[in-house]
Amino acid sequence: MPRKMKRNPIPSSNQVEGNRKIHPIIIYPFSHPTDERHLRKLYGAIENWLKGNNHNYRRPVTVLNRQTCRRAIEDPKKRASFEAVMEKIVRPVSDVVATWAVDTCQMWLTGFGQAFDQCNRNDIFWLIPGDFHYDSATGEEALRKLPGLPHDVWETDCELCLGEIQVPPNSAKQLIDTYGTYGLLYNWFPAEAQALREITDKPRTEFFAISHDYLRTALIPERWYGYEQTIVLLLQGFKGVKQMRNIHKIALGRIEDDPSSRSTLSGAMQQIERTERVLKLFWRELNEREDPNWPDTFRKLDSQSEQIRGAALVIMQQTLRLN
């Protein structure tokens, strides 16, 4: 007789009230770091937070890209380091969830989905990127402030708490947000951009905590995007200039992330192109439902969008060349 296939259980939709929990979700660096001190510092802080457990943390989830894992274990120079980090630093304080992902936002979806399937109603979900310089003076300052993100959602009417980092004025991150992200936002969603600018200058932040209802809306009635999901979450919290969700911000200081191709001109342009792509898609999905003449408006905005992207390229090319 043919063997019966084992089916994965479908999670129940009947999430009930229970002991409220905070779900920490750590995103392992896309490339295994050469300097393990920052991961050791981060997971050491996580271990201390769990011991205190004043706000009922669930056991954290660490999302690991299988591509990262494969590259590390197949590289003789990295394998021992990677395996040691997994066994001595990561696994003792978190459950590792491995997934194939083309981008970090897809890794976010895996982590949030894993936590959401195990949650009670009114739980809080806390995203923690693993690729920042935590073993530094500014990193330690950020680690002291990070628990404030989920605690703000826990203790106030906040539904989305953003962690905002400071960056140098002419850095790639700042240039991307000033001339790329907000330039494009003002083109495609001018009212929302105006309201968002009063809350944050960093709408692409990787540090945030989100309420159960806000996350549920992003996962189920809406849909998740494979990139620049923070921008989408923020846009979903507004209707024009009217703020539909309570969004707060906590300053984390000047913590830096690992150097990467994002600091190059090519990498910066990739970030802007991805933002433009998701804004176009999000705009179409909203407007094609309500406006029969949306193609004409889209063509106009698309032409303006191309000009904004081109101007951003010129500015970044000149500025990054001088840095």
Image (cartoon, helix red, strand yellow):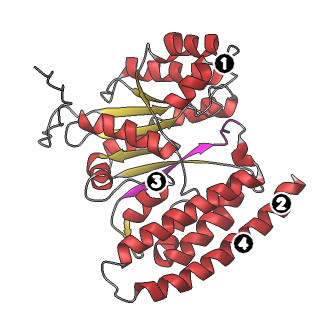
79 vs 18: above or below: above
The label nearer to you, 4 versus 1, is 1
- Which disc is residue 108 wearing? none
Q: Which dot, 2 or 1, sits closer to the camera?
A: 1
Q: Position of residue 66 (x, y in %)?
A: 49, 29
Q: Residues within 10 Å of mark 4 (few under 14, many from 20)?
A: few
Q: CA distance from mark 4 to mark 3?
A: 23 Å
Labels 4 and 2 touching (C-beta < 8 A): no
- Sooner in the amino-acid sequence: mark 2 or mark 3: 3
Q: Earlier in the sequence, mark 2 or mark 1?
A: 1
Give the residues in magenta: 246-258
Residue 300 at x, y percent in the picture: 55, 86
Query: Residue beneath label 4, please?
Result: 310
Residue at 61%, 21% (x, y): give it.
72
**Amino acid under label 1?**
Asp
User: Was residue 181 drawn as part of the magenta stretch in this picture?
Assistant: no
**Residue matched to label 2:** 319
* First along the sequence among labels 4 and 2: 4
Q: Say whether disc 1 or disc 3 marks the residue closer to the N-terminus.
A: 1
Chain-order first, disc 4 or disc 3: 3
Q: Amino acid at mark 4?
A: Gly
Residue for badge 1: 75
Q: The disc labelled 3 sits on which kind of residue?
A: Gln
Q: Secondary structure at mark 4?
A: helix
**To which residue does mark 3 refer?**
229
Residue type at mark 2? Thr
Q: Are marks 4 and 3 in contact (CB under 8 Å)?
A: no
The residue under the point 68% across, 67% down is: 179
The foreground one among 243 and 70 is 70
Q: What element does badge 3 sit on?
A: helix
